[in-house]
Amino acid sequence: MRRLAIVFACGMALALPLAGQGIAAADTWAGCQGNTCTVGIDRVANIIITQDGQRIPLNLSNVNVTVPACWMAPNYTQAQMLAALAGLGQAVKGGGGSPAELQSVSKYITEVRTNPSSNGLWWTPEYLNTPGGLACLANLPPWVWVPTGQAAPAADNPLTPLQLAELAEAALRVPKLKLTLSPHGKTYVNLPTFLWTGNPALITVTATIPNYLTETVTAQPGTPQIDPGTSSATPYTDCGTNGSHYSAGSPQVTGAGPGSQPDCGAVYQAPSTAAPLGYTMQVTTPWMITWTGHGPMAGAPPRQVGTIQVPVDEIQSLNNGGT
């Protein structure tokens, strides 16, 4: 079984740092069981995730999306494959490998050398770092040559565009809400209170399998849902992606007096006398997810929930008719 060969190889410490971008993560190994010797070049999933242009980590062993436990992906040029196998042969020899192991490596080097073309890439197994991912390797070939412009055989289980997009969606991280109000610090009964969420207008996450496939998902905040924290208040939700359409210092905000309404925020009809810290306003923002392909995605869109305390005071006046 291939899994047993991997265990044997790991015991001989045959993981090699190989030349070329991204290849250092490969596990190049050889091992024998009975009369069968096996050579392979495996790699823990080599998927690059970026959010708004910055690379972010992805824990592939803990994502709630439907992806295969292992797959084939393009990883090596003809020259890189030969160099990898040559280095493996040296490691087997230096590590006291058996004649059968050395013969097996030599056989595979000869097989790769007979490849008539340099216009393409060797596809090798990649896998999730889970027991299922390791077991899955037994069902994949050690490598497959795919000429440029051709697709890998479907039987070799390449990742689909939708699966890669769902991985990008799983990696998406929306920022925490940064709620701000105007008036800041304290508001008053019947005075319009404007709200901003601090959200960006757009987030993009891109997942890439180098030399093979790239998919991008786009997240856009929806209309905030506002719970003022008391029934003695009226919420207003004509909001933009960042809350109120007006800036905090604009005339529409600074000139808004009692009896007027905010486009996004609330108007309180009673002071927060019974709540020393103020009413707890809760803001919920759903996000809408799209991707570069077509059709629904499996993941649930993210939602942000944040709270802010709103002390509400009351300005009392006495009208005695001028007497």
Image: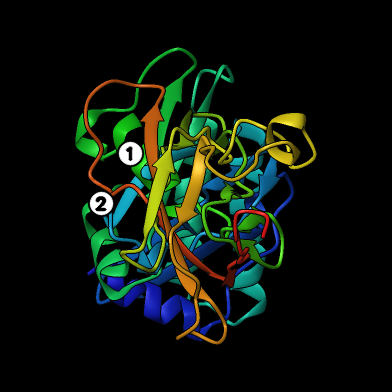
Q: Which mark is residue 275?
A: none
Q: Are marks 2 and 1 in contact (CB under 8 Å)?
A: yes
Q: What's the distance in space between the residues labelled 2 and 1, CA to CA?
A: 8 Å
State the image coordinates of residue 78 (x, y, percent, origin top left): 60, 32
Residue marked by disc 2: 68
Secondary element type, mark 1? loop
Please name the residue shown 22% across and 44% down the image: 298
Residue 143 seen in the figure: no
Is residue 231 something that shows in the picture? yes
Q: Height in image: 178 above or below 78?
A: below
Mark positioned earlier in the residue sequence (2 or 1) = 2
Q: Quadrant of residue 92?
A: bottom right
Specify the amino acid type for callout 1: Leu
Residue at 60% across, 70% down: 313
31, 246: nearer the viewer: 246
Quadrant occupied by the C terminus: bottom right
Q: Position of residue 225 (x, y in %)?
A: 37, 49
Placement of the N terminus among the 4 image quadrants: bottom left
Question: What's under tag 2, amino acid-wise?
Answer: Pro
